[in-house]
Amino acid sequence: MSIPPLLSGLRGWQKDAYHEYFRLPRRDFLLVATPGAGKTRYALTVAAELLARREVATLTIVTPTEHLKHQWAQAASGFGIAIDSAYSNAQGRAGADFAGVAVTYAQVAAHPALHRQRTENRRTLVIFDEIHHAGDALSWGDAVKEAFDGARRRIALTGTPFRSDANPIPFVSYVDEPGGGKRSASDYVYGYGPALEDGVVRPVIFLAYSGEMRWRTRAGDEITATLGTPMTKDQIAQAWRTALDPAGEWVGRVLEAADKRLTEVRRDMPDAAGLVIAGDHADARAYAALLRGLTGKRPAVVLSDDPTATKKIAAFTDSGDRWMVAVRMVSEGVDIPRLAVGVYATSVSTALYFAQAVGRFVRARRWGETASVFLPSVPVLLGFAAELEAERDHVLRAVTSDTPEADELAEAQRERDTPDAGLDEPAFQPLNASVHFDRVLYDGGEFGTAAAAGSPEEEDFLGLPGLLDPAQVRTLLSKRQQSQLAARSPPAQPAPATQPQPAAAEPVTRQQLAALRKELNGLVGAWSHRTGQPHGVIHAELRQTCGGPALPQATADQIQARIAKIRAWALSAR
């Protein structure tokens, strides 16, 4: 087996992580690297070195999906490592022509004793792709532990190590933290922030859309509410589902805006593609029909029960087609580097799923590429978008079957082959969903002012160039927002000469503005501690309620109005 020059093609972080792996003799190694950073290449480089040193004799690669088995095998072939991605439990022993096999977590759980025997018979390196899946169910974790406890070496990879449940992840070390919980301990971490600075991943621009939603409850009551404004949990869920209704205006106009954005991006990235992440099969087909009406071409549709899904993804990856619509199939791990525009058209609200979805768009191929993700103005999603660069570890804490975290995790994991209204919230009937452009979220900041869909204000952001470095993105967003605010401000009218001039208001100093921002941020922090809501979500609710731009651009009066509002919230909650 020929080994290519191992370190010549590695990125800086991959070389650092490679040297860290071999710095100390260790059986287990947990690598946390942001989606799109190059975890596969790193792991195969280490595997090639271990094989060359004869420290291991065979590989087992464990993946979340069937498609990823073949993707890993193809990548391994570039290192001269032959991996059998068609291996089945019925085979027993792997073929002599292969240096290892690729299997799924479900495959291991179906026959852990078989994989334990294979592992113990030869010096085995096990690579766990997205190791957090080993905690999907307690039985899966037990099976993985049984199957690979005897492995000579284990490398665990993940881009999203956090989970919402209390299932421990096998072969991951945990350290005690204040309050009685335990937090996962990583051996090497390469987060989104450093990857963005290095140009390894693209900056992500989130374009949020609101609108007036109208639906009928099971009791026959008609409710009208604006997406993104304070509502009960059930009302948020129903307003969100109303927005995603293919028969309503919201989805159609958002898809139209996303297609306009894709056209702009393709000026600099000619093969750039878009992905719509749908909630179920019926919605996916309906969204595909809307896109066909917009573009005149049938988009690729990938469904979770489609036996040809892997072939469709491979064909789309190598084509120049504009759009793919998928249910779950490409939410994690699948490598389609040309994806640059996304539409989050599912009601899954877990941080894990959101991060996996956004991870499909961040892989950079050359300097200056940007990613754009369209989403509904739902507080939980706005919070996730605002906290994109936050590092998260897996925290073990007690989660009972009736907690929101357990419900959300089960919802994200459930196969969504058919519409599922009525299972997680009271049955309702969507009636109408209007739409307007709400704001842009980038690098923890908010830009833009509420505007009608198709307006010049929306076009300002849809027409951002497709090649911008992170600093240019922020500069251009700020300029667009300032010009919009200036255009909306009426020109000052001079007072009539016969009227006495009112005394000029004392200007607000920079120090006074800073003090007001500090006071508001302190109140937001206290409210966050009290309610558990992320800071970004609270700021978004204050802006929706009181009006005005994001905090950095807000006037003293606007900040004082938000301070008064959050104090009123605190008093009413007593």
Image (spheres, rainbow, N blue to C red):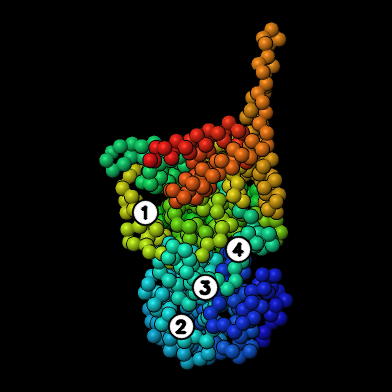
Q: Position of residue 330 (x, y in %)?
A: 51, 63
Nearer the observer, disc 2 or disc 4? 4
Mark earlier in primary sequence (2, 4): 2
Mark earlier in primary sequence (4, 1): 4
Q: CA distance from mark 2 to mark 1?
A: 38 Å
Q: Residue sitting at 31 percent across and 47 percent down?
A: 427
Q: CA distance from mark 2 to mark 4?
A: 28 Å
What numbered label is drawn on residue 129?
3
Question: Residue at label 4?
Answer: 191
Question: Residue at label 1?
Answer: 419
Foreground pick, 113 / 261: 113
Q: Amino acid at mark 2?
A: Phe
Tell whether 431 sits left or right of 94. left
Foreground pick, 238 / 400: 400
Q: CA distance from mark 2 to mark 3?
A: 14 Å
Nearer the observer, disc 1 or disc 3? 3
Determine the secondary structure under disc 1: loop
Q: Position of residue 534 (x, y in %)?
A: 49, 50
The residue lying furthest to the top in this view is: 498
Q: Residue sitting at 66 percent across and 44 percent down?
A: 477
Mark earlier in primary sequence (1, 3): 3
Q: Residue sitting at 69 percent across and 70 percent down?
A: 11
Q: Amino acid at mark 1?
A: Pro
Question: Residue at label 2?
Answer: 148
Q: Residue sitting at 45 percent across and 84 percent down?
A: 149
Q: Give the total of numbered labels.
A: 4
